[in-house]
């Protein structure tokens, strides 16, 4: 009997470097991509030690071959799709298409994509192969504000990280998405603006996850967001998941921006607001104290505006929208865990009682109710 997509996905997710069938299949696939390679070998195939998150399965591979009698070797990163994981609005194929374009832009720290594959028979799901870039990730678990190399760094080093990350955002947002042929990032729908269409999508995902049983917080957020959709918008490329944990760092400078599953077109404020909201939820929302050198909300906006020489438009709207997007994601995840008989945040957690919901409620109070 033919395996379903989910069964193929499960095989890929559980595979390790000991899965000789997968290693052999992947080695054969590499031979088709490097036709002049003789005696090609897959020397290693493993998950990085700091791998985390749910949005995609990441593996590092070392390949070796002979070409014209001379030895050649390359280290690459293989990123495969995780079906139905924590990002219900994500698009694997949009991510691959965007990263292929961004990875070829000089001085933009986005890894170059060499090849992509839709045939799930190779390793159990769609995947792409990108350049390996040496660097450290700011950990999500435990949160970097509680332990690890960011926690142990100096105030000045942490400030340098924020400045470098914001410099990347300014550079990304300044790119001409139309000349780059990125119209495929536009959301479909009847809304007259991209923001409205994106909101429609998120509301539909939330209502599916909860079977139409909205919490009072979700209902209040949705109502406010629909009543205050900006009538005009200046769109740019939007990373969609901008934060320290999705960057690789070397000497406290951003050397690679990863995880583009949530890529879209949006106002620049969308990326900035997501970064600020997500970080608030994973520090204060978890009872953690922000570290010295972690830029505060107004400091990040001021630094971005000084670099870009542009005012950040509609920030308050996008801050609440970021919170609602995060609420949709965590609700979707909690429902998956619930069906598996587990709890995402442990005993007592629910779609009404979790760090994301608490942070959104706080932002709503500070922005809407004041």
Image (cartoon, helix red, strand yellow):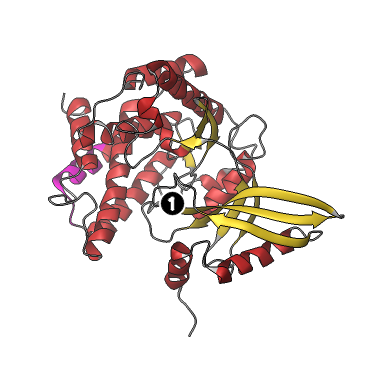
Is residue 26 shown above or below 78? Answer: below
Please provide percent x and percent y for residue 173. Answer: 52, 29
Q: Residue at x 22, y 57 (%)?
A: 210
Could you tell whether 58 is left or right of 196 in the image?
right
Answer whether residue 312 is magenta in the image: no
Residue nearer the viewer, 164 or 139: 139
SS for dot 1: loop
Q: Residue at x 66, y 64 (%)?
A: 27
Image check: 89 left or right of 78? left
Would residue 314 be visible to someone looking at this image?
A: no
Residue 337 in percent (x, y) is at: 26, 59
Which residue is labeled 1 in the image? 90
Q: Is residue 34 above or below residue 243?
A: below
User: Along the horizontal axis of the image, is 205 left or right of 289?
Assistant: right
Q: Residue at x 44, y 58 (%)?
A: 82
The total of numbered circles placed on residues is: 1
Q: Which SS does the magenta portion mostly show?
A: helix
Magenta region: 213-224
Disc 1 crowd rating (10 Å Cα; few below 14, some 14-19, many 20+) is some
Residue 88: quarter of image: bottom left
* Residue positioned most to the right: 68
Relative to residue 268, is residue 18 depicted above or below? Answer: below
Percent position of residue 296, x then y: 32, 20
User: Which quarter shows the C terminus?
Assistant: top left
Q: Which residue reaches farthest left?
A: 348
Q: Is residue 170 visible?
A: yes
Q: What is the x, y in percent for residue 313?
A: 40, 24
Residue visible at 68% across and 67% down in the picture: 28
């Amino acid at each position: 009997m033919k395996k379903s997509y989910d069964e193929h996905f499960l095989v890929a997710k559980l595979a390790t470097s000991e899965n000789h069938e997968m290693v052999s299949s992947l080695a054969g696939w590499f031979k088709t991509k490097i036709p002049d390679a003789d005696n090609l070998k897959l020397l290693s195939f493993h998950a990085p030690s700091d791998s985390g998150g749910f949005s995609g399965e990441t593996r590092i591979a070392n390949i070796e071959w002979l070409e014209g009698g001379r030895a050649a070797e390359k280290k690459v990163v293989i990123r495969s799709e995780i079906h139905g994981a924590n990002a219900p609005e994500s698009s694997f194929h949009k991510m691959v298409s965007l990263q292929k374009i961004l990875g070829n832009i000089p001085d933009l720290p986005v890894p170059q994509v060499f090849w992509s594959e839709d045939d799930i028979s190779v390793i159990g799901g769609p995947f792409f192969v990108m350049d390996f870039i040496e660097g450290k990730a700011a950990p999500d678990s435990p949160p970097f504000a509680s332990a690890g190399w960011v926690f142990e760094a100096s105030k000045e080093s942490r400030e340098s990280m924020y400045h470098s990350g914001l410099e990347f955002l300014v550079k990304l947002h300044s790119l001409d998405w139309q000349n780059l042929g990125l119209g495929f990032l536009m959301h479909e729908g009847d809304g007259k603006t991209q923001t409205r269409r994106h909101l429609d999508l998120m509301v539909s995902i939330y209502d599916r996850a909860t079977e139409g049983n909205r919490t009072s917080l979700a209902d209040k957020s949705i109502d406010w967001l629909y009543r205050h959709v900006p009538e005009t918008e200046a769109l740019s490329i939007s990373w969609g998941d901008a934060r320290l944990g999705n960057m690789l760092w070397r000497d406290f400078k951003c050397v690679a921006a990863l995880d583009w599953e949530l890529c879209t077109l949006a106002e620049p404020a969308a990326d900035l607001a997501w970064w600020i909201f997500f970080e608030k939820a994973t520090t204060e929302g978890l009872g953690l104290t922000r570290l010295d050198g972690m830029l505060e909300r107004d400091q990040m906006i001021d630094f971005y505006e000084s670099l870009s020489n542009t005012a950040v438009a509609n920030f308050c709207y996008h801050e609440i929208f970021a919170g609602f997007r995060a609420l949709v994601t965590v609700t979707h995840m909690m429902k998956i865990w619930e069906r598996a008989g587990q709890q995402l945040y442990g005993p007592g957690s629910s779609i009404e009682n979790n760090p994301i919901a608490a942070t959104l409620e706080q932002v709503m109070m500070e922005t809407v109710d004041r």
